[in-house]
Amino acid sequence: MSEQLPGQYRVYGYRWVVLAVFMLVNFTIQILWISYATIISEASHYYGVSHQMITLLSMVFMIAFIPLSLPAAWVIDTRGFRVAVGFGVILMGVFGITRGLAGSNYALALASTIGIAIAQPFLLDAWTKVPANWFPARERATAVGLITLAASAHQAWSANAFSLAGDMFPRRVVGSVTGLGGFLGASGGIFFSYYVGQILGAKGGAYFWIFLAPSVAYLFSLLIVHLLVPRLEPEKIDVPQTA
């Protein structure tokens, strides 16, 4: 059955099927991203390359996300999430298979990983677009939370930040807003990874300050949300509706 919201749009029960499939897609690409993290030494021996080259297989996702996040967000908002997510799923599937067939050929494994990394922005930037299009306002935070849980359970708290875009901006520009946030986040992630390596190299196991930094960042972000959001109203942006 479907639920008709007065003066707005119809909400279909099929939305939970869409959400489940989207969760599976994001779960899969996260596995493809982080799969080498726990086997760096073994992978280095298998491919015959240094540890740094194995680490590059994960870093390439953040490197690719920076230039592609905003274009992917534009595609999501102008062409629709079905086209954007479909494109990302096809890339992920094709290059996921080629990486599996690469064997000990590191160059092919790297090229395939770059292909998977190109797909990632088309999936991650749609985290808030799917709930905004398919779910009523009262269920969007739950939908985003489930997507976040499927993609990266350790970031479940940050699901609240993703749901803000759907609550504060029109549905037609949610993808662009999320893409901008992802662009800034990926940029920060690359710099943070570099400096973490420098700190650990200079001070050894100085993990206290490394764990303290993101913890303080979360609390600072929460403070900003509580200070600003109650004073803000949903933004009204006149953007032509596309078919």
Image: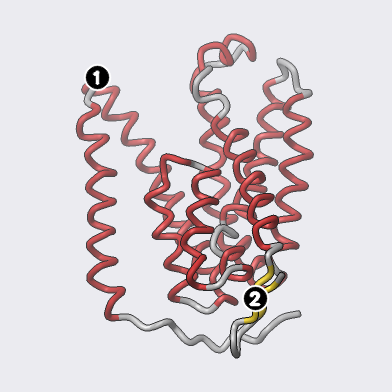
Q: CA distance from mark 1 to mark 2?
A: 58 Å
**Numbered circles on residues, count:** 2
Residue 154 position by quadrant: top left
Q: Earlier in the sequence, mark 1 or mark 2?
A: 2
Residue 101 numbered mark, or none: none
Q: Is residue 54 left or right of residue 234?
A: right
Name the residue type under label 2: Glu
Residue 204 numbered mark, or none: 1
Q: Is residue 51 left or right of residue 221?
A: right
Residue 3 numbered mark, or none: 2
Name the residue type under label 1: Gly
**In the current view of this chain or complex, which residue is farthest to the front?**
1
Local SS, label 2: strand
Circle 1/circle 2 CB separation < 8 Å: no
Q: Within 10 angstroms of label 1, few (less than 14), some, or many (20 or more) residues?
A: few
Horizontal and vertical percent position of residue 27: 60, 41
Q: Is residue 20 left or right of residue 62?
A: right
User: Which of the two residues, 220 or 111, is positioned nearer the viewer here?
Assistant: 220
Q: Is residue 231 above or below residue 216?
A: below
What residue sits 58% from the left and 46% below the top? 64
